[in-house]
Amino acid sequence: MLYAKPKLNAFPVFFRTEGKSVVIVGNGEEALAKARLIDHSSAVLRIVADAPEARLAAWIAGNAAVHIEDSYRPEHLYGAALVFAATGDEALDRRIVADARRLGLPANAVDRPELCDFFTPALVNRAPVAVAIGTEGAGPVLAQLIRARIDQLLAPSLGPLATLAASLRDAAEAALPKGDARRRFWRSFFSGAPARALARGDAARARDAAAELLREGAHAGGHVALVGAGPGAEDLLTLRAQRLLMEADIILYDALVPEAVVAMGRRDAERLPVGKRKGCHSRTQAEINALLVELGRKGKRVVRLKSGDPLVFGRAGEEMAALREAGISYEVVPGVTAAFAAAADFDLPLTLRGVSSSMVFTTGHDLKGDVLPDWARLAISGATVAVYMGRSVAADVAGRLIGAGLSPDTAVAVVENASLENSRRFHGTLADLPSLEGRHDLEGPVMTLIGDAVAGANFAGSEPLARRRAAPAAARGKHSFAPALAHKSA
């Protein structure tokens, strides 16, 4: 079935306001809202208000607006470029619009779309860059919601970056031929060292970096961002991560990164899976390191998308070392690590005053060696232990910790697919943990949390790790701290 191409009833344009007057007629909140909107521009603002309400009067006093303290008359519109009727009185608004049209002036009547010659957008201001969102008056709240999302995606430094770009336009046209060379320069400018310097607030470094790009003819090296994709839910991605994904030429992503997160990248970016699952490595770590260096030397903007946080069991250290040795610029963008997401799914306090004041991040395989790791004594003294990738070695984890002196009754919480809608939660004790190895129905990543503070979790809706004659005290209700406290005093 073919659908007709949708047509706009109002075509979006940007109206020049520099040196021109905009007239707003009204005393209250409607006039104030339009005044704040027009104040984003360089227009001369004239507000006709014979009895302005307190908030409008205060705004006029604190801003560069001309206050005409008079009852509305048609001559108040003379010389205006745009007119806003914001009186709240339908009859008066109609009269103002009619007067404006007789004078050949476009008019807008607030909240009366049938009277409007134009509509005001929800505005994202990064002057001189602006993004305007309109709904033809049908859904102002929808426009505001869209505006909020776009506002989050655009760096606050975008405006100064665009201003710097405008100052370099003539120099770039003189130094670089039309075509690929000039496009490479501007792409490197808007997403490379000048942009990063302005994002840090270093305008001098941004100018120096731009001059260096011009000297090099835009053949500067690329940039690699090691980005934490979080535990899986796309709305847990950081705003910085989103921006970098939208700027990337190539996205290299791990196997555990969901497609929904990868899809948040620029539509035409190349997407390359390089992830490693147990028993299935698409690329070795050495190959990944070499690929990052190769892409950086080609001048590519690369996002290396890692599950959770890049610095927590993400092998970021090896990749950073390779990039440093090759002289490729890089940055690290933190992500929500799986331990925090699992704790949030359980309403679980990872630290608890009087019970646990420290944490250990480890992998299940860390407990398979002949020597017990140094952190094991922290677990025995009350630290909360977060075990990554520990399902297949759960019996080893439990046995080594119990053998080291940790009580078999220590509370345990297990989460599969933390943060996602299809997550599953399990509760029990350290003595129950070996049963996790037999759960062949668990196909997603599994996080295990062990410690006295775990007894404070909300176990409602979770499944027992092992069927027992009596469920552990920590599993019988919400926020039961008694087992942990009893264990601490033993």
Image (cartoon, helix red, strand yellow):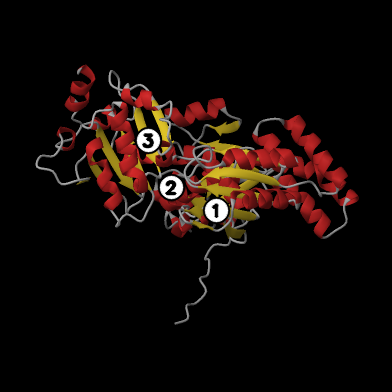
In this figure, which residue is indicated by the disc labeled 3?
386
The residue tagged with tag 1: helix, strand or loop? Answer: strand
Front in this rendered view, residue 234 or 24: 234
Type of amino acid at the residue the image marks with label 3: Ala
- Seen at 81% across and 43% down, the residue is 213
The residue tagged with tag 2: helix, strand or loop? Answer: helix
**Does residue 488 appear anywhere in the picture?**
yes
Instruction: For the N terminus, give its image quadrant.
Output: bottom left
Task: Of the two numbered discs 3 and 1 on the same chain, state the one appearing first in sequence.
Answer: 1
> How busy is the neighbourhood of tag 1: few (under 14 within 10 Å), some, or many (20 plus)?
many
Q: Kindly report which numbered mark, 3 or 1, lies closer to the viewer in this rendering.
A: 3
Instruction: For the C terminus, give its image quadrant.
Output: top left
| Image position of 462 (left or right of 283) | left
**Separation of marks 3 and 2 at Cα, in angstroms:** 23 Å
**Outermost residue to the right:** 174
Q: Residue 392 carries which label?
A: none
- The image quarter in which residue 362 lies: top left
In this figure, which residue is indicated by the disc labeled 2?
235
- The image quarter in which residue 67 lies: top right
> How busy is the neighbourhood of tag 2: few (under 14 within 10 Å), some, or many (20 plus)?
few
**Separation of marks 2 and 1 at Cα, in angstroms:** 17 Å
- Seen at 70% across and 48% down, the residue is 293
Type of amino acid at the residue the image marks with label 2: Asp
Task: Of the two numbered discs 2 and 1 on the same chain, state the one appearing first in sequence.
Answer: 2
| Image position of 189 (left or right of 443) | right
In this figure, which residue is indicated by the disc labeled 1?
253
Task: Of the two numbered discs 3 and 2 on the same chain, state the one appearing first in sequence.
Answer: 2
**Outermost residue to the bottom:** 1
**Outermost residue to the left:** 469
Type of amino acid at the residue the image marks with label 1: Tyr
- The picture places residue 255, in percent across and down from the top left corner, at 49, 55
